[in-house]
């Protein structure tokens, strides 16, 4: 059976292939004009044909995959296959916090199985993301590098807030919000995401380190759970959820204090609770579960029953697959405490979550649903501008530098480099944010820029992309990229290190061309002379009589990285303003 989905909104040791067996906040604080006047970055080529894609979610408890066919004409996607394997990456070493060899082996096996299914369905591209367990493990990045080396599968590590944003997109792909406020809650193995939105731009996004696997591992040692452990578990869950829910309610009150939002629940724990509830109250499990409702009073009864049963007894409930009986109490308790704090009595089930959100995000970045999701298509740009303003960057000056950098990028594309729209967008972001380090200190501000970008919570980007942007900004001045620099070594792929090496050289030139920060250079024209290995850079002056001496000096000072990287000599040619007779 397929699912039609229409976007409906205006460590030490790593496992090798020998071990693998194939087996069956508020981030949005921008003014309205930024939405009305999106920044032009160029567009990916339009996609005419139907595409088959797979999205993989490497979670704390399980690895999930959906395979979809995307019809760009509607636009819509149809789910043609699903795969799930419980791997428990969250069962980390208690002393080191590292992912264990056994968990990584299970994960590698599950990912290999996903690849085989994707290959059999002629999937063109696999979009994979990793969340809480890999984010927090000391060897998480090493594991992802190993996955790429062994399986050739690149997995993006996303932040908790970015995870929440994509969960929101996934929920919107399968549910009409009708411009009414909804709270979306997703209880995973390692974290719980909360989103407040009305089908348009989310008002609030959060990710809290309370999850079903995490809390079970930290608080439960008895079976059935003892009263002492249950009370500690309940108090901890409530305590961790209080702050994000208070912040969410602040945004809710700003909208209208009388509004009671609908609560939408997604993912495995909540779906399992819905299956149990439906079986007991209806005698059957609805297919699909989408739209099914659970009352808080019924959830309280389930929690009370679960606490009195052993894992083996809980396993007799319908829907209790794999190791779910061990963690269902913690998951149900998190949901119960969230509903109590939110003062919401009814939960509505949504079968769309992170995986579907990854697909919608891909469609957005490729311009397939721009008309119906216009605000989301520029989420990256708006997030960058928000961060620039937060750190009191001169945005107008940064836009001039960005325009010059993108002009250099466009004119040298196919001539000196082969990067495309994705890398172009990273260069734009770095150009806007390159000077944000002044917020900390003028001295070594390029290094401060790296830190602020790296930890600033940019939305819409993967961790690798954020690392790339931060490195591009880091190298807009002073030293060229070097392997001895820790920040440069943080770039896990040769491709992204090359992006930084080449595009930071372009950014240096753009910064030099605005040395006086007055827009002295109106625009540039690049002219390559292959016979002499020279690039003539024609500088069109903005004001008559301006000799642009400081810009020329700065360009001469900064051009070495460019010449070394691209193997050409840079020859500036000043083009004065032509005064009409």
Image: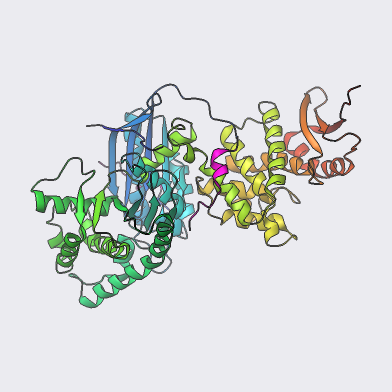
Residue at far bottom of view = 228
Q: Residue at x 9, y 49 (%)?
A: 282
Q: Quadrant of residue 241?
A: bottom left
Drawn side of residue 176 relative to residue 458, left or right: left
Q: Main secondary structure of the magenta part?
A: loop
Q: Residue at x 17, y 67 (%)?
A: 304
User: Is the residue 274 above or below the residue 81 in the image?
Assistant: below
User: Is the residue 573 above or below the residue 564 in the image?
Assistant: above
Drawn side of residue 130 relative to residue 405, left or right: left
**Quarter of the figure that contains the C terminus:** top right
User: Is the residue 233 above or below the residue 517 in the image?
Assistant: below
The colour scheme used to paint the residues is: rainbow
User: Is the residue 120 above or below the residue 175 in the image?
Assistant: above
Q: Is residue 493 visible?
A: no
- Span shown in magenta: 16-39
The residue lying toward the viewer, choosing from 213 and 440, is 440
The residue lying toward the viewer, choosing from 29 and 2, is 29
Q: Residue at x 47, y 40 (%)?
A: 376
Residue 476, x across and y down, in percent: 72, 47
Drawn side of residue 288 relative to residue 573, left or right: left
Asked whether 26 falls inside the magenta stretch, the response is yes
The residue lying toward the viewer, choosing from 217 and 494, is 217
Residue 310, x across and y down, in percent: 15, 66
Residue 488, x across and y down, in percent: 63, 51
Q: Residue at x 66, y 49 (%)?
A: 473
**Quarter of the figure that contains the N terminus:** top left
Q: Quadrant of residue 399?
A: top right
Q: Is residue 504 visible?
A: yes
Asked whether 278 falls inside the magenta stretch, the response is no
Residue 207, x across and y down, in percent: 41, 58
């Amino acid at each position: 059976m397929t699912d039609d989905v229409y976007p409906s909104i205006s460590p030490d040791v790593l496992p090798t292939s020998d071990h693998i067996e194939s087996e069956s906040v508020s981030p949005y604080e921008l003014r309205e004009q930024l939405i009305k006047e999106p920044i032009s970055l160029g567009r990916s080529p339009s996609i005419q044909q139907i595409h088959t894609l797979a999205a993989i979610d490497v979670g704390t408890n399980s690895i999930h995959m959906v395979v979809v066919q995307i019809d760009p004409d509607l636009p819509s996607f149809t789910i043609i296959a699903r795969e799930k394997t419980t791997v428990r990456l969250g069962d980390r070493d208690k002393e080191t916090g590292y992912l264990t060899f056994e968990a990584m082996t299970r994960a590698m096996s599950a990912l290999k199985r996903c690849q085989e299914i994707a290959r059999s369905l002629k999937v063109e591209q696999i979009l994979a993301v990793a969340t809480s367990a890999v984010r927090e493990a000391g060897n998480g990045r090493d594991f992802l590098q190993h996955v790429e080396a062994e399986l050739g599968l690149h997995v993006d590590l996303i932040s908790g807030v970015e995870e929440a944003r994509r969960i929101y997109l996934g929920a919107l792909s399968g549910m009409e919000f009708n411009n009414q406020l909804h709270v979306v809650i997703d209880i995973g193995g390692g974290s719980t995401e909360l989103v407040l939105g009305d089908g348009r731009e989310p008002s609030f996004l959060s990710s809290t380190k309370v999850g079903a696997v995490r809390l079970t591992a930290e608080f439960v040692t008895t079976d059935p759970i003892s009263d002492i452990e249950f009370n500690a578990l309940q108090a901890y869950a409530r305590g961790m959820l209080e702050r994000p829910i208070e912040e969410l309610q602040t945004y809710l009150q700003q909208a209208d204090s009388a509004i009671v939002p609908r609560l939408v629940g997604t993912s495995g724990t909540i779906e399992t609770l819905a299956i149990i509830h439906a079986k007991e109250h209806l005698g059957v499990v609805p297919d699909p579960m989408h739209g099914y409702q659970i009352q808080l009073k019924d959830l309280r009864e389930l929690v009370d029953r679960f606490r009195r049963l052993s894992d083996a007894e809980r396993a007799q409930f319908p829907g209790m697959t794999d190791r779910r009986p061990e963690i269902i109490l913690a998951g149900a308790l998190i949901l119960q405490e969230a509903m109590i704090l939110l003062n919401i009595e009814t939960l509505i089930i949504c079968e769309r979550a992170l995986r579907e959100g990854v697909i919608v995000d891909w469609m957005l970045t490729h311009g397939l649903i721009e008309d119906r999701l216009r605000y989301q298509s520029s989420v990256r740009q708006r997030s960058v501008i928000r961060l620039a303003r937060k750190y009191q960057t001169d945005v107008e000056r940064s836009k001039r530098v960005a325009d010059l950098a993108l002009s250099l990028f466009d004119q040298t594309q196919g001539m000196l480099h082969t990067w495309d729209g994705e890398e172009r967008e990273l260069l734009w972001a770095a150009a806007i944010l390159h000077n944000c380090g002044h917020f900390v200190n003028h001295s070594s501000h390029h290094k401060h820029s790296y830190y602020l970008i790296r930890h600033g919570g940019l939305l819409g980007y993967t961790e690798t992309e954020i690392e790339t942007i931060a490195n591009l900004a880091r190298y807009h001045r002073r030293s060229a990229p070097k392997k001895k620099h820790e920040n440069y070594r943080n770039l896990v792929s040769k491709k992204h290190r090359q992006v930084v090496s080449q595009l930071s050289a372009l950014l240096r030139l753009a910064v030099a061309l605005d040395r006086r920060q007055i827009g002295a250079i109106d625009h540039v024209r690049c002219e390559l002379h292959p016979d002499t290995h020279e690039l003539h850079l024609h500088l069109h002056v903005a004001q008559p009589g301006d000799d642009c001496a400081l810009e020329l000096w700065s360009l001469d000072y900064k051009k070495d990285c460019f010449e070394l990287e691209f193997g050409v000599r840079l020859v500036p040619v000043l083009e004065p303003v032509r005064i009409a007779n």
